[in-house]
Image (cartoon, helix red, strand yellow):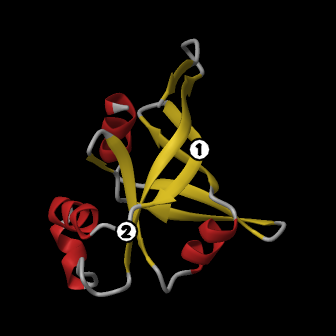
Amino acid sequence: MEKVLNFLKEAETYYLATMDGDQPRVRPFGTAHAFEGKLYIQTGKVKPISKQVALNPKVEICAFKDGTWLRVAGELVEDDRVEARKSMLDAYPTLRQMYDENDGNTQVFYLKNAVATFSSFTAAPETIEF
């Protein structure tokens, strides 16, 4: 999982795909954080992604950096503990302009049953499960 986390952080922006009924939705994200041995992302409960994940937790992440791309398929699980939200916001202090761990809006998810695949045009794919 560390290799996946580091790649996402170094890429700075990754794209998260969810389902909105039968319509895929993709948007840029920038939060990737390790907490208690799991890979976490953050959003706000007022955003459409929150409702989409509640209905269908299966997602896919895609990032590209230095000729290599990463795809991560898995399920998002909400962690509603204040400690998890605080850990994320402490790791991304600029988010504190919009979020607080006690605001009722900040939402963090961890990936479960994740399969990450690193690919490029010059090397064999590498798969990591976590």
Q: Residues within 10 Å of mark 2 (few under 14, many from 20)?
A: some
Q: Identity of the amino acid at label 2?
A: Asp
Q: Kindly state the secondary structure of the residue where label 2 is placed.
A: loop
Coordinates of residue 34 in the picture (x, y in percent): 28, 45
Q: Is residue 125 left or right of residue 79?
A: right
Coordinates of residue 128 in the picture (x, y in percent): 49, 24
Quarter of image, res 98:
bottom left
Q: Which mark is residue 80?
A: 2
Give the labeled residue for mark 1: 74
Instruction: Looking at the picture, tell me which residue is in the foreground, 17 or 87.
Output: 87
Q: Which mark is residue 89?
A: none
Quarter of image, res 7:
top left
For the point 42% across and 71% down, which residue is it? 43
Q: Is residue 10 above or below residue 123?
A: below
Q: Residue furthest top?
A: 124
Q: Earlier in the sequence, mark 1 or mark 2?
A: 1
Q: Is residue 85 left or right of residue 91?
A: right
Q: Residue furthest front?
A: 81
Q: Identity of the amino acid at label 1?
A: Gly
For the point 27% across and 67% down, which residue is it? 85
Label 1–label 2 contact, CB within 8 A: no
